[in-house]
Image (tube, rainbow, N blue to C red):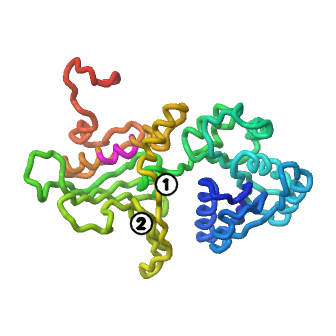
């Protein structure tokens, strides 16, 4: 399969960084993924090419280079004959939609990267592209947003809800790495106090597994494993709280200071430091209050993650595995465990939820 991503350039931005990482990953799965660029502006171009990502330059000379640019874009689509043309941000989305009739069997995908955009704050050309994108939104076969807020905003603009889906950036690292945006259906494991002799109710040692069934087929299921030994100074990594991703072709660790990727024979093939301000989450939350946008780690992200903690503690307390229904958010076939889903509140207490 050949997939061409259409983007303005590979300047050093977050969307561009994600695009290069995505294409590198697709090519590692034997998908002929390429990036077609309006401009040659440097940035991440060298990194992409060194990683073996083919770049197609469309030679746009400026904002008003329209006729020649559109001819070159059309010629590229006819020459390359991709099965999928994936736009990245508004103008590439519009051009991908207009290119759909050029070859038979071409599927068009749009990438939506923003939420609650106020077009009045932008120039006339940006406002025009905002309107055109909305009017052409019935053409793409699929529209991918990187957040639920972005999807909600797109649908409110008039994008077709049935073809607009969310593939999140991910903030909660373990769930994001697994690609799951729901609850697990089966939880098993062990939790007990093996070291501390005190009044704490919760275990000091855990090994809990959470199964996400996907569509039930082999290769689609996901397993999240959680381990905790708060009494031991000996750790699997220097930080003690890294997330380990295991795949068929390698392993990746992701911690506070960076990423490490290991290939065959546990050989380190990539190491990248992460430098994020310590107050990044707090700043994002305060900015969301000011703007009315969703924060990166909104309440839904917190709910899905905190549910894992509650289910793990229920497994530890009942000392048995549980089956969980993600839709009703109840434990199935175990009344004793299901009672632990909610607490008993004092009569007339101010904190009793209205639904109880």
Query: Which stretch is magenta?
Result: 303-309
Image quarter (top left, top right, bottom left or bottom right) of the N terminus: bottom right
Q: Nearer the viewer, residue 173 or 141?
A: 173
Give the structural element (helix, strand or loop) at label 1. loop
Q: Which residue is mark 2?
A: 253
Q: Nearer the viewer, residue 107 or 173?
A: 173
Residue at x 47%, y 51% (from the top left corner):
180
The quarter holding residue 43 reads bottom right
Q: In the image, residue 339 lies at what x, y percent?
A: 24, 36
Residue at x 13%, y 58% (from the top left corner):
194
Say left or right for 211 vs 135: left
Q: CA distance from mark 1 to mark 2?
A: 16 Å
Q: Which residue is mark 1?
A: 179
The quarter holding residue 306 reads top left
10 Å crowding of disc 2: few (<14), some (14-19), many (20+): some
Q: Is residue 234 above or below residue 89?
A: below
Image quarter (top left, top right, bottom left or bottom right) of the C terminus: top left
Q: Is residue 192 above or below residue 330?
A: below
Q: Earlier in the sequence, mark 1 or mark 2?
A: 1
Q: In the image, residue 327 lies at what x, y percent?
A: 42, 39
Q: Main secondary structure of the magenta part?
A: helix
Residue projecting furthest to the left: 197
Residue 143 on the magenta span? no
Residue at x 69%, y 60% (from the top left corner):
10
Say left or right for 58 vs 265: right
């Amino acid at each position: 399969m050949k997939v061409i991503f259409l983007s303005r350039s590979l300047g050093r931005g977050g969307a561009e960084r994600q695009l290069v990482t995505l294409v590198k990953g697709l090519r590692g799965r034997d998908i002929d993924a390429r990036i077609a660029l309006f401009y040659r502006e440097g940035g991440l171009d060298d990194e992409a090419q060194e990683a073996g990502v083919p770049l197609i330059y469309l030679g746009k000379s400026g904002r008003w280079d329209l006729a020649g640019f559109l001819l070159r874009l059309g010629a590229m689509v006819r020459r390359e004959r991709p099965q999928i043309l994936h736009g990245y941000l508004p103008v590439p989305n519009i051009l991908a939609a207009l290119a759909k009739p050029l070859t038979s069997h071409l599927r068009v995908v749009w990438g939506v990267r923003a939420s609650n955009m106020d077009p009045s704050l932008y120039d006339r050309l940006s406002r025009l592209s905002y309107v055109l994108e909305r009017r052409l939104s019935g053409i793409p076969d699929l529209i991918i947003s990187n957040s639920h807020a972005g999807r909600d905003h797109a649908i409110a603009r008039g994008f077709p809800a049935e073809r607009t889906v969310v593939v999140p950036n991910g903030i909660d690292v373990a769930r994001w790495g697994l690609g799951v945006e729901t609850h697990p259906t089966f939880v098993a494991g062990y939790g007990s106090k093996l070291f501390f002799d005190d009044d704490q109710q919760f275990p000091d040692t855990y090994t809990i597994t959470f199964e996400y069934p996907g569509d039930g087929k082999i290769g689609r299921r996901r397993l999240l494993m959680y381990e905790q030994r708060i009494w031991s100074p000996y750790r699997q990594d220097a930080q003690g709280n890294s997330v380990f991703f295991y795949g068929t072709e390698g392993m990746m660790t992701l911690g506070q200071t960076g990423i490490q990727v290991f290939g065959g024979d546990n050989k380190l093939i990539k190491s990248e430091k992460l430098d994020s301000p310590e107050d990044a989450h707090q700043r994002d939350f305060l900015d969301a209050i000011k703007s009315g946008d969703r924060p990166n780690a909104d309440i839904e992200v917190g709910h899905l993650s905190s549910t894992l903690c509650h289910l793990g503690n229920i497994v530890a307390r009942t000392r048995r595995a549980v089956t969980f229904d993600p839709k009703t958010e109840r434990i199935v076939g175990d009344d004793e465990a299901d009672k632990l889903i909610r607490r008993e509140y004092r009569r007339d207490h101010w904190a009793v939820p209205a639904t109880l």
